[in-house]
Amino acid sequence: MINFTKISIFAAAVIALNFTACKIAGDGPQDLPADKPAMQENVVQSKPISEGSLLGDGQEGIAGPNEVIIQTEAQWEALYTKMNSVNPTQKEVSIDFEQRTILAYFDQIRPLGGYAVEIVKVTEINEIITARVKFTIPEGNSIDIMTQPYSIVSIPKTKKLIKFVAIIE
């Protein structure tokens, strides 16, 4: 039996991600020059940092859906503090911000357990970096608990345009 509520929530998340799916990491280019030739898609090596769900019913103050690009230790500490403000679950991670940029995606608050997001692939074409975000919706019985799924990865330091794109499987 199809659960239309779950499908509607999932569809809303995908639509919201596509409407808000572009952030700039720094002073990188906004648009490509017309004379710039098309380039091949290259995989950007990403390292997982953390993935899971916040359980504070939004009290952490991280609105979702939300794409976050972190370039400094201060930005990372602010996010880390928010994530641990209600239910401390994020372990301290040391990141060299001279070498790395952090990409994080926070989904909207969900009424049930079992929802998940994952940054599954990061690629680059023509000076634009694309982070592909996979959404998982629960099947069958789910626990009644407010969750906010998130995924955090690091990539080599960049100031290029970064887009987050939903993928549906």
Image (tube, grey):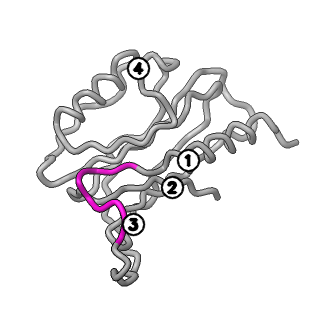
Quarter residue 51 falls in: top left
Checking the image for residue 123, the label placed there is 3
Q: Which residue is mark 1?
A: 19
Per the rendered image, the range of residues in magenta is 23-32
Decide if residue 132 is on the left or right side of residue 70.
right
Which of marks 4 and 2 precedes in the sequence?
4
Q: Is tag 1's residue or tag 3's residue first in the polypeptide sequence?
A: 1
Where residue 128 sits: x, y (%)? 36, 65
**Element on which disc 3 rests:** strand
Badge 2: few (under 14), some or many (20 or more) residues near its Cα, within 10 Å?
A: many
Question: Circle 3: is it few (<14), some (14-19), or many (20+) Cα within 10 Å?
Answer: some
Residue contact at pointers 3 and 4, CB within 8 angstroms? no
Label annotation for residue 165: 2
Give the residue drawn at x 34%, y 60%. 30
Report x, y in % for residue 140. Answer: 75, 37
Label 1: state its secondary structure: helix
Q: Amino acid at mark 2?
A: Val
